[in-house]
Image (spheres, rainbow, N blue to C red):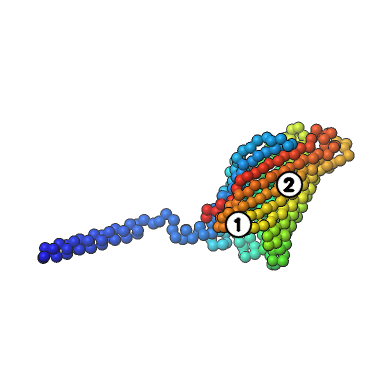
Amino acid sequence: MKQIILSLGLMLLFTTIVSAQMHKQTDTVSNAYKPLVSADRLKLLEHIDFIANMQYANSTAFENGTYTGSSFAMNQFRLEIKGYVLDSTVFFRFRNRYTRTPTVQSVDKLDSSVDMAFVGFHLSDKLSLAFGKMIADYGGYEFDTNPINIYQYNTIIANADDFLTGAHFAWNAPKNQQFMFQVLNARTKSFSELYDDIPEITEAKFPAAFVGNWRGSFADGLFSTFWSYSYIQETKGKNVQYIALGNQIKLKKTVIQYDFKYMAGQIDRLGVISDLVADDFSSFIAFDTDYIEHWLRVQHSFVPQWNVSLTAMVSDAYWNGNPETISDNHIRTAWGIIPALEYAPFEKLNLKFFIAYVGRKYKYSSDAKANFGLTDSNTGQLLLGFSSPLKFL
């Protein structure tokens, strides 16, 4: 019996010593090695968003009523990181477009695939500044919508330089009004890359875009505005002026958006008319052009998780500086209609499946047909896929 008691006592003593050594070793390890990401650093992630903006679809294409083929494609994939550092004083946003070929641009030294790369500062709860590559905030709700929710853009936005490098100033005025002003580079490529073969124009010393807009909200958000005026000068003595008037009515289940856009250019900055009337666009550019557009979108949520929308758009192009002795400066009218049905099955995840049809029709004036050999045409595209701003953080 004494031997048993002695054995148990020795075992207990041994266990106590080993346990003490293990705890001592564990404490030594925890004190010697720090975690790779500290608790303070982890708190910063609370203010960081990491988003994969995606639009994927199977596309069935038609041209002039004839089926031309089908394919699967990731139409939009833009990886985005944005948020705050240093409390809420300093903010940043970076977004890269993986559906565009990356080419380093000669002016801002960034890949063309980079949509945004800027840092901003909140000077107060009403004033902010930002510097870097950013959205040229041209105004209108078509341009303000996340690209993954746009199945086809109208002419101006589809062909403009929408992301430029410069400075941004914003003022959050009383009564839910915001005013913004930007000074940006007018382009991402150099003058010689774009216009070197065109002898009629010379480079401006400061090719810049000046953009001002107003975001208004009335009646608790029932009616909103996004109006903008832009003045762009790339070459000496020739400028471009752009007006966008966006208006929105937001009801309980229905959202109605209407944009009016007008671009008057002493030089054809979009290049659409130049491309239509010239055999070699690289050595020609049209002067004194006008683009006038209307864009309307109506979206209705008839039951939870289901949305139906209809987008209609029209774009008119005019060449006022046409040297040909023709009676009509109107070149083309482009129509578009996009009905879509969307289903969002997940309550806590912003992912939706959609089916949409993009119908486009292009009609040219009789003078444009006679002088430039243009012919009317139409295209169709049936899309079946999904879209999501998939948020990882």
Residue 316 horizontal side relative to residue 48, left or right: right
Residue 47 visible (yes or no)? yes
Residue 178 to residue 56: above or below:
below
The numbered disc on residue 337 is 2
Kindly state the secondary structure of the residue where label 1 is placed: strand
Residue 109 placed where, x, y %? 61, 44
Mark 1 or mark 2: whose residue is earlier in sequence: 1
Residue lying at 62% horizontally and 58% vertically, measured from the top left:
304
Residue 204 visible from this viewpoint:
no
> For this rendering, which residue is in front, 5 or 355?
355
Residue at 57% x, 61% y is: 89
Residue in view at x 67 percent, y 38 percent? 61
Q: Is residue 354 above or below residue 103?
A: below
Q: Nearer the viewer, residue 276 or 178?
A: 276
Disc 2 residue type?
A: Ile
Write down the residue under mark 1: 120
Q: Nearer the viewer, residue 296 or 317?
A: 296
Hey, what amino acid is under mark 1? Answer: Gly
| Quarter of the N terminus within the rendering | bottom left
Task: Determine the residue positioned at 83% across, 42% down.
Answer: 330
Using residue 79 as the reference point, say whether residue 19 is left or right of it: left
Q: Classify mark 1: residues with Cα within 10 Å, few (<14), some (14-19) or many (20+).
A: some
Discs 1/2, front: 2
Vertical order, 219 against 160 (above or below): below
Depth check, front residue: 146 or 236: 146
**Image quadrant assignment for residue 215:** bottom right
Name the spot of residue 340 as percent of width and height, x first.
Answer: 68, 49
Looking at the image, which residue sits at the far front? 303
How far across and how far down the image is residue 202, in percent?
A: 75, 40
Cα distance, mark 1 to mark 2?
A: 38 Å
Q: Quadrant of residue 246?
A: bottom right
- Left or right for 225, reference 88: right
